[in-house]
Amino acid sequence: MARTPLTSQRPDLRLLLDQGFPKPPGFALPSIDQTVDVVHLSNFDRTLSENSTPDWVVYCHAAAAGFDALVTRDQAQTRQSVEMYVLSRLEAFTVITWKKAIEDPVREWGQLLAYLPEVKKRLLRENRPDVVLLPAPTLTQENIWRAEDRLGIEAQRRGVSNRQVRVEVEAEIRDWLQMTSRDRYEFDQILGLE
């Protein structure tokens, strides 16, 4: 079997993670998305993270090194005039942060990964944003359902009773069990089939 050789092409997107961003051991983004390169600030230039370096200096160094964006927990950067001035002067560099601070490494990485396709799309455009604010990960009531309520909504949509929907569903389950020669009684205790 012929293998496709790995190329040393530059990834589509290079992200620099600010010093406060979590650095989980063993996690490698290329195992999920090879089009994105992620480097932690301490691996890029330790002197920038060891000294009290202004954020705008980090932007300049990162942009000069070919990074597309800085991912930071420090949302206050978006309200600092010097940082916004420098960011407006850099031709192709973006700051990615959260609209509301998150102090949970799992949520931060999860949110970044979840929005990465959208972020990538916007950063690869000609008129790219200078700042991307990721929304806070929350679950509202509209994201949480009870299955019984959904059956009621389906019954209402079809103009039939809740009982009618349950009878149809149970018949569909019994038909599948019979068609696959599965023992119906295997599921009786769990599902309460009559």
Image (tube, grey):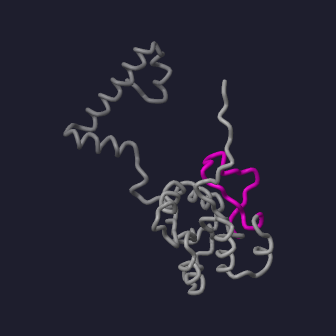
Query: Which residue is found at the position 48% from the left and 26% from the top?
Result: 189
Q: Does 176 sit above or below residue 102? A: above
Task: Give x and y (percent) for residue 113.
Answer: 57, 55
Number of marks present in the image shown: 0
Q: Reply yes or no: does residue 178 show up in magenta.
A: no
Query: Which residue is found at the position 60% from the left and 67% from the top?
Result: 69
Q: Nearer the viewer, residue 21 or 178?
A: 21
Q: Reply yes or no: does residue 27 show up in magenta.
A: yes
Q: Does 157 sit above or below residue 82? A: above
Task: Give x and y (percent) for residue 143.
Answer: 42, 54
Say which quadrant the N terminus sits in.
Answer: top right
- Residue 153 appears left or right of 65: left
Task: Give x and y (percent) for residue 148.
Answer: 37, 42
Residue 76 position by quadrant: bottom right
Q: Nearer the viewer, residue 10 or 98?
A: 10
Query: Which residue is found at the position 70% from the left and 60% from the top?
Result: 39
User: Which residue lies most toward the top here?
Assistant: 181
Q: Nearer the viewer, residue 186 or 10?
A: 10
Residue extent of the magenta highlight: 20-43
User: Which residue lies most toward the left here?
Assistant: 159
- Residue 153 appears left or right of 47: left
- Residue 53 appears left or right of 72: right
- Residue 118 appears left or right of 93: left
Task: Give x and y (percent) for residue 11.
Answer: 62, 53
Q: Nearer the viewer, residue 190 or 95?
A: 95
Say which quadrant the C terminus sits in.
Answer: top left
User: Which residue lies most toward the bottom here?
Assistant: 81
